[in-house]
Image (tube, rainbow, N blue to C red):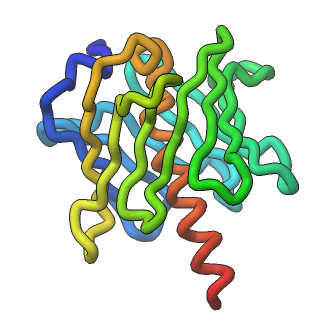
Amino acid sequence: MKAFSEYFGQTLEIVTPSCFKSNYNLVANGMTICSLRSINFWCTRYEVDGFGKKWEVYSASVWKGKTEIKESGKELPIASYEGSGLKHSGIFTLPRGEKLNLVFNMWKSFYEIQNETGEVLVRYDNKSFFSSTIVVTMYKKSDLIDKYPFVIMVPFLISTQRKHAAAAVTH
């Protein structure tokens, strides 16, 4: 199985195979390399499947903005993401205390995974205004992303949940 950094320089896209299901695929050269799918009716638990492993992503609490990630079939979380209030950012805390930042553009046109020093590792851009496809660009290779490849799909999930929450508030 390839590591995520081996896709450096390639065009990657997150696509929705069906508009009726909460399933998303990360595609490189027409091949799915990672997927994200809802595993319960209420779309509160998701499974990331790719790079030879599976992880479960879920909200730790309805009242807190914390998302936890655990290996499929295990009980304890290995990583978490916590948004920082009204700011357009949050922090991934990984198993050995490593941290990655998730930074959202104010206009929601793109978002980025950055290392602790603020260097952009991965950027997510809307393909076009009318398309639901997201273009994923790797700016810098990272051992952390190779070691924990679920980090690629979780920002997309968080962005999607933020968009749904914003749409619910406006109606």
Whether 143 is drawn above or below 30: the answer is above
The residue sitting at 15% across, 40% down in the picture is 11
The residue sitting at 49% across, 53% down in the picture is 104
Q: Position of residue 164 (x, y in %)?
A: 58, 70
Quarter-of-image position of residue 30: top left
Quarter of the rendering occupied by the C terminus = bottom right
Specify whether 167 is left or right of 75. Answer: left
The residue sitting at 79% across, 20% down in the picture is 76
Q: Position of residue 133 (x, y in %)?
A: 28, 59
Specify whether 38 is left or right of 80. Answer: left
Residue at the front extreme of this rendering: 117
Residue at the bottom extreme of this rendering: 171
Q: Position of residue 131 (x, y in %)?
A: 26, 70
Frontmost residue, 77 versus 54: 77
Q: Position of residue 22 (x, y in %)?
A: 50, 58
The residue sitting at 47% across, 43% down in the picture is 36
Q: How many callouts does the rendering have?
A: 0
Quarter of the rendering occupied by the N terminus = top left
